[in-house]
Image (spheres, rainbow, N blue to C red):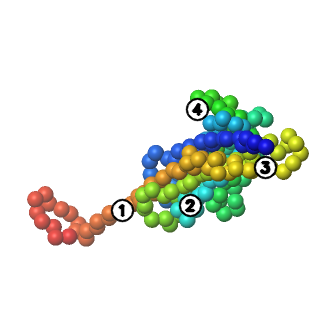
Amino acid sequence: PTYVDNLVDLVTTKVGPESCVYANEGPGPYSITVRNRGPSRAYQVVLVDSIPNAQLQYVPGTLTVSGNNAAGPVSNAACSVTPDGSTIQCSLGALRPTQATAGDQVITVQYQLRAAANVPAQDAVRNVAVSSSGCSSDPTANGTACVRDQFEAVATLPDNTAEAFTNVCARADLFVLKSSNAQSYVAGVNSNN
C-alpha cells in the first residue's frame, strides 16, 4: 500500500515591547500568533511559551486569546499558566490552512510581562514560543488514537518557533542635597561652605 501523510506548516510569530522594560515598573506587552500555512489541516495544535522568569515575570490576569480554529472561536480557557509563571501552554485545536492575510484561522495570544524586582540591566532577554501539531490525521474521525506516522519530522519546520528579545534597562533615581551652615551669602564672595 501507498501511504500519503498530511503536511502542515505552522507559522508562529512573536512580538515583545519595542522599548526597555524597567525593574519594578510597568509591564511590557507580548503578542504571539499561530497559523497553518498548510497544505493540510493541523490537528491538536499546541502553543508553548517558555518565559525566562528569573528576568521576566508573567503579570496575572493579562492573558487573552482571540481568533478561530476549525471549530469556531478560541477562548482564554484554551490557555493555562504554570503556578510559577514560567510557561504558558495553549491547546488551540485544529487549524485549517490559511493565507497570511486571512484572519479566520489565525490565533492570537497576548499577555504582559514585567522585569523581576532585582534583575540587573541587560540586553536581549530571550523569550521563545513554539507551536506544534500532534496528529497527521483527525483522531476523532475513526475513533482511534492520534496517528503521527512521519508527520512529526515534516511538521517541525523552522517557522513554528518564534522568539522575542526584551531589553531590561536600569533607571537611576538620584537625589542631590547640599546644605550649608552660613547665615547669609554675598554675591561674588566665596563662602567655603
Amino acid at pointer 1: Phe
Amino acid at pointer 2: Pro
Residue sticking out furthest to the front: 1
Amino acid at pointer 3: Val
What is the CA distance from the residue labelled 3 to the residue labelled 4?
28 Å
Residue at (53%, 51%) from the top-left corner? 163
Tally the marks. Answer: 4
Q: Position of residue 128 (x, y in %)?
A: 56, 54
Instruction: Indicate which disc, 4 or 2, sits on the residue closer to the N terminus.
Output: 2
How many other residues sit within 10 Å of disc 1, few (<14), some (14-19) or many (≥20)?
few
Residue sticking out furthest to the top: 102
Residue carrying label 2 = 52
Q: Nearer the viewer, mark 3 or mark 1?
A: 3
Residue carrying label 3 = 147
User: Do residues under tags 2 and 3 come within 8 Å of each other at their CB atoms?
Assistant: no
Tell me if residue 22 can be seen: no
Q: Position of residue 193 (x, y in %)?
A: 20, 70
What is the CA distance from the residue labelled 1 to the residue labelled 2?
33 Å
Residue carrying label 1 = 175
Task: Identify the secondary structure beneath mark 3.
Answer: loop
Instruction: Indicate which disc, 2 or 3, sits on the residue closer to the N terminus.
Output: 2
Residue carrying label 4 = 100
Instruction: Indicate which disc, 3 or 4, sits on the residue closer to the N terminus.
Output: 4
What is the CA distance from the residue labelled 4 to the residue labelled 1?
52 Å
Tell me if residue 176 can be seen: yes
Taking depth in this image into account, of 27 and 182 the one nearest to the observer is: 27
Taking depth in this image into account, of 31 and 155 the one nearest to the observer is: 155
Q: Is residue 69 left or right of residue 166?
A: right
Instruction: Indicate which disc, 1 or 2, sits on the residue closer to the N terminus.
Output: 2
